[in-house]
Amino acid sequence: MMRGMFSAISGLKQHQVMLDVTANDISNVNTIGYKSARVTFQDSLNQLQRGAAGANNSTGGSNASQVGLGVGLGSIDNLMSGGTRQTTGNPLDVSIEGEGFFQVAEGKPTAANSPLTPTSYTRAGNFSVSNEGYLTTASGQYVVGYQMDQNTNQPINTEVAIKVPNGATGVAVDNTGGVSWVDSNTGNRVTGYRLTIATFSNASGLERNGGNSWTTSANSGQKIVNTPGQGGAGSTWGGTLEMSNVDLSQTFTNMITAQRGFQANSRVISTADEMLQDLVNLKR
């Protein structure tokens, strides 16, 4: 059998992966906070036909002769550049300008302001207040932040689920991550919590978890937690949402490239099949 046929088969498989990733990006072109991906290839094993030889007294050196055996998947990289901000006018919508992710957690808090460990991270800031008063994501996860000390107006560095008191009105998130409301007893606006932003040394190493969320991996590095605008964390913008960072012009170009690569590899298989047919027809 011909090596070229199997090399072309590997090309078909990897260009299918490229098209899968491209199709996923296009399907998420309007997904809030979505980060696009990029596929890279790498050459596969090479069969050595003749080894390299060094120079001697009578001849110069010669290079090795190798025949490639196809292509493999190099990487699927997460492109973590920021998307554009869209103004919504909803006071509970928040976007991040710069590095970092909102922290969210699963598992019901045992009590108000009890510590809650974040389980995943997201750039989608379309938050809402649940019927129990907790600030949650669209999928119902609890948004984690720092409680504010009302005497010093400084955050208490314990991560808790953000809960709005009963009867409070006018809940909003400001541009510094402060979650505030109008107190039903005094009529004054109170900033009870501040959102926390998690940054990573290698944000591209995070793993997609579905539902606009990410989880840590062995290569993402340990998170660094700060309030918005501090310690390298991005600043927050209330009343806005971060849109997908998919570049449709580049994505459609990738789709054409994937299709043409698939087509070219299929032609190699057809040609190899014709050559095998000619070989079989040598004996009639």
Image: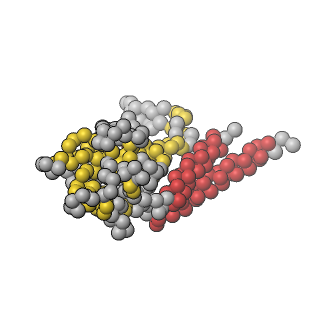
Image x and y of residue 174, in percent: 26, 60
Which image quarter holds the C terminus? top right
Q: Residue furthest left?
A: 152
Q: Residue pushed farthest right? A: 284
Instruction: Identify the residue shown where x is 58% and y is 50%.
Output: 16
Q: Is residue 139 left or right of residue 195?
A: right
* Residue 61 spot, x, y in % from top left: 41, 35
**Quadrant of the image occupied by residue 67:** top right
- Comparing 246 with 277, the one in front is 246
Name the quarter where the N terminus is drawn: top right
Looking at the image, which residue is at 55% across and 54% down?
Answer: 19
* 184 to 282, vertically: above or below: below
Which quadrant of the view contains residue 158? top left
At x 38%, y 35%, the residue is 218
Q: Quadrant of residue 259?
A: bottom right
Q: Position of residue 197 (x, y in %)?
A: 28, 49
Residue nearer the viewer, 154 or 25 = 154
Q: Is residue 60 above or below residue 281?
A: above
Q: Is residue 250 visible?
A: no
